[in-house]
Image (cartoon, rainbow, N blue to C red):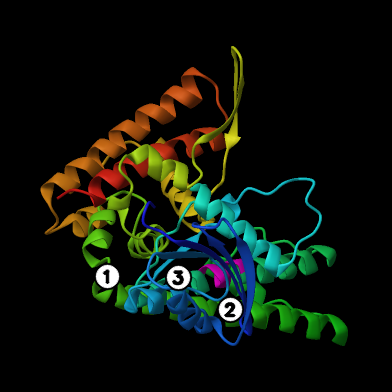
């Protein structure tokens, strides 16, 4: 940053932007208020001249400003808001003060920047997140219906578990004597069916878009792992992006929040639960895939079909992953008596390292 003349912090909103400008020559820190959409910051930065470095927080305004600035040869970076230091005693928060704080942290080199995805990558990622929202909506709709039936003393006795075809047939055969219960039941059931249909539509779209997405090759590699099919592979690629930007698999595990928290002082070292940093969607996908760790390593017909025409080195990594996760699961549960959830999360961290290796094979 020796050639930088101005450090600029931008607090970007839909209708106005506050800028905090730190002049490296004089040390002066001044404020500016820019009225308009986020792109109004580009002419302002151009007037400051070459050697200007700006930053704004990732948020609902998206990455349009960073992409437009890159097209104009401007240095605008996007930082992770969750990693910005804040004083516990600071009780005053305004847009202007936030912009000044960003400028100071940028000059000090204390900000963590995020990768700006391409337009195509962001489009697919939005669809992946829409699918994740539908999953949450469906779970809540199902809970409402289940709680309603429980209050009426109705419970599905099998065969099978809830939300199987047998359970759906049982729901369609239910009837109520009073009108209030009838309307309530029909409304809850219709919500479940509607969201299920919307989810299936999005699932089909993601499967169709996977071969045309920017991560088509990586998706094919991830599908070689047991427990990771098309939807999970697309979700991981959409949230992680370029796997090669992580120089070591430990960095990917830390990004996904699968590493234990730590409190170390003097000679005392205490490890706690995982940090849960980063995208929770990707973390959940890996944890669900790791639930297969207790199974005996094998190549099923479905997995063999997914591995067809793939790089043999990737298939070898996937097989080593099965062997390693099974040993890890046995060691944690049988030998050390760990809870199955603890063992699953530990295996998810191991799985992340194998996924990184497969995705970064040259």
Instruction: Give the answer, above or below, for where 218 lies relative to 326.
Output: below
Cα distance between the residues tagged 1 and 2: 28 Å
Marks 1 and 3 in Cβ contact (< 8 Å): no
- Asked whether residue 292 appears in the rendered view, the answer is no
Q: Is residue 272 above or below residue 235?
A: above
Q: Which of the two discs, 1 and 3, sits closer to the camera?
A: 1
Q: Residue furthest front?
A: 26
Check disc 2: other Cα within 10 Å, few if <14, some if 14-19, many if 20+: some
- The Cα atoms of the two marked residues, 3 and 2, are separated by 15 Å
Residue 186 disc label: none
Q: Is residue 243 left or right of residue 1?
A: left
Q: What secondary structure predominates along the stretch shown in magenta?
A: helix
Tell me whether circle 3 and circle 2 mark residues in contact (CB < 8 Å).
no
Residue at horizontal 59 percent and vertical 51 percent from the top: 84
Residue 57 versus residue 268 in the image, above or below: below
Instruction: Residue under label 1, please give it.
Output: 214
**Does label 1 or label 2 sit earlier along the sequence?**
2
Residue 314 in view of the camera: yes
| Secondary element at image label 3 | helix
**Which residue is disc 2 drawn over?**
195
Position of residue 53 in the picture relative to residue 181 (left or right): left
* Residue 119 among magenta residues: no
From the viewer's perspective, is 175 left or right of 50? right
The image quadrant that residue 268 belongs to is top right
Task: Please give the residue where the numbered disc 3 appears in the rendered image.
Answer: 128
Where is residue 114 shown, x and y percent of the image?
44, 58
Total labels drawn? 3
The x and y percentages for residue 201 are 45, 81
The CA distance from mark 1 to mark 3 is 14 Å
Q: Nearer the viewer, residue 255 or 295?
A: 255
Label 1 SS: loop
Of the residues tagged 1 and 2, which is closer to the observer?
1
């Amino acid at each position: 940053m020796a050639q930088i003349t101005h450090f600029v912090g931008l607090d970007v909103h839909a209708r106005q932007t506050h800028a905090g400008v730190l002049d490296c020559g004089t040390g002066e820190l001044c404020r500016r208020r820019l009225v308009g959409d986020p792109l109004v910051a580009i002419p302002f930065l151009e007037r400051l001249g070459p050697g200007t470095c700006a930053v704004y927080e990732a948020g609902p305004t998206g990455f349009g400003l960073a992409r437009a600035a890159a097209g104009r040869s401007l240095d605008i970076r996007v930082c992770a808001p969750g990693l910005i230091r804040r004083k516990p005693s600071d009780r005053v928060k305004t847009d202007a003060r936030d912009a000044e704080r960003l400028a100071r942290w940028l000059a000090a080199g204390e900000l963590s920047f995020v990768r700006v995805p391409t337009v195509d990558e962001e489009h697919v990622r939005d669809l992946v997140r829409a699918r994740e929202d539908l999953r949450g909506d469906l779970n809540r709709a199902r809970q409402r219906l289940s709680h309603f039936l429980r209050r009426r003393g109705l419970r599905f006795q099998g065969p099978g578990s809830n939300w199987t075809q047998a359970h759906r047939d049982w729901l369609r055969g239910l009837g109520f004597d009073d009108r209030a219960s009838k309307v309530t039941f029909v409304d809850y059931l219709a919500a479940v069916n509607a969201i299920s249909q919307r989810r299936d539509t999005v699932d089909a779209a993601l499967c169709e878009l996977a071969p045309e997405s920017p991560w088509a090759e990586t998706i094919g590699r991830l599908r070689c792992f047991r427990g990771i099919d098309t939807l999970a592979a697309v979700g991981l690629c959409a949230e992680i992006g370029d796997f090669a930007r992580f120089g070591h698999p430990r960095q990917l595990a830390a990004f996904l929040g699968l590493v234990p928290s730590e409190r170390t002082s003097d000679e005392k070292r205490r490890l706690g639960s995982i940090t849960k940093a980063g995208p929770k969607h990707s973390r959940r996908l890996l944890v669900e895939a790791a639930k297969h760790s207790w199974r005996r390593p094998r190549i099923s017909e479905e997995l063999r079909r997914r591995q067809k025409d793939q790089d043999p080195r990737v298939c070898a990594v996937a097989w080593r992953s099965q062997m390693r996760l099974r040993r890890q699961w046995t060691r944690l549960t049988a030998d050390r008596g760990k809870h199955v959830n603890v063992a699953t999360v530990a295996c998810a961290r191991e799985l992340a390292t194998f996924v990184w290796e497969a995705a970064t094979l040259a």
